């Protein structure tokens, strides 16, 4: 995983610091909108949240069969303390940990993860997620993005992101060219209180 982890970047790996930053940026309103307008989960769905962090999206979902997986043990421990009764929380690599659950998930969430992965790793991840998705299931990706004539504040903040593989929209789309999915995509420029740009892909498995 290509990301900055030293100095202040290491603090983001601490659940309380991570959540504090999110609150300052207006993440609560963003999560409401993200869950309602983009994820559109329905009660009873089997949902996989890849790179779930401390599972901060879970309170905004209906009663789903939720699995959150992340490499960060502290984030998963925090998620278990906060939401242990609402889901299953795993420390591990999704490409290796859930092979027995092929074609079982209705919705797979991949938020703020692809820009931490190089092209090879991102393609491998998305390919494995397609194997875990049911026919007709959706895989949602949501990452920061480079744009032409980008707001200088957004450009600067994205430049400082811990992920080292922020892409233009075309770069994200190239990651899914060979997958058995239909692709819808959209740029969002108003998800946070500050200027910031996100690129969302909705991959529907054939």
Image: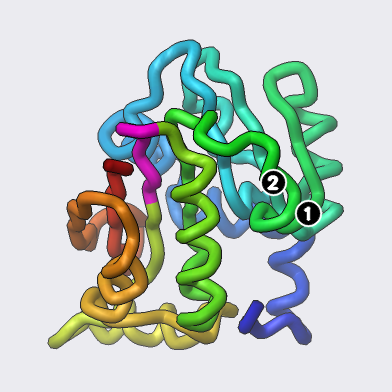
The residue singled out by tag 1 in the image is: 92
Q: Where is 81 relative to 44, above or below?
A: below
Is the residue 51 above or below the residue 67 in the image?
below
Q: Position of residue 128 (x, y in %)?
A: 54, 55
| x 31%, y 67%: residue | 178
Task: Point out residue 39 in the picture as x, y percentages from the top left corner.
Answer: 36, 35
Q: Is residue 26 left or right of residue 138?
A: right
User: Tag 1 or tag 2, which sits nearer the N-term?
Assistant: 2
* In front of the other: 103 or 62: 103
Q: Residue at x 84, y 53 (%)?
A: 74
Residue wearing tag 2: 69
Quarter containing the C terminus? top left
Magenta residues (range): 135-140
Q: Is residue 39 left or right of residue 79?
A: left
Res. 144 mark: none
- Classify mark 2: residues with Cα within 10 Å, few (<14), some (14-19) or many (20+): many
The secondary element bearing badge 2 is classed as strand
Is label 2 in contact with label 1 (beta carbons under 8 Å)?
Answer: yes
Question: Circle 1 — which element?
Answer: loop
Q: Nearer the viewer, residue 125 or 49?
A: 125
Residue at image x 47%, y 74%? 115
């Amino acid at each position: 995983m290509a990301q900055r982890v030293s100095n202040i970047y290491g603090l983001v790996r601490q659940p309380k610091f991570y959540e504090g930053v999110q609150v300052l940026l207006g993440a609560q309103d963003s999560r409401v909108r993200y869950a309602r307008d983009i994820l559109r989960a329905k009660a009873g769905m089997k949902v996989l949240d890849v790179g779930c962090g401390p599972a901060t999206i879970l309170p905004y979902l209906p009663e789903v069969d939720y699995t959150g997986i992340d490499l960060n043990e502290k984030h998963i421990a925090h998620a278990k303390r906060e939401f242990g009764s609402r889901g299953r929380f795993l420390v591990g690599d999704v490409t290796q940990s859930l092979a027995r659950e092929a074609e079982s998930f209705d919705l797979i969430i991949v938020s703020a993860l692809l820009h931490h992965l190089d092209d090879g790793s991102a393609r491998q991840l998305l390919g494995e997620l397609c194997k875990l998705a049911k026919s007709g299931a959706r895989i949602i990706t949501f990452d920061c993005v480079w744009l032409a004539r980008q707001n200088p504040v957004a450009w600067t903040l994205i430049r400082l992101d811990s992920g080292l593989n922020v892409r233009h929209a075309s770069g994200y789309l190239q990651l899914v060219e060979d997958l058995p999915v239909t692709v819808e995509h959209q740029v969002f420029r108003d998800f946070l209180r500050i200027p910031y740009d996100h690129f969302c892909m909705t991959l529907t498995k054939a």
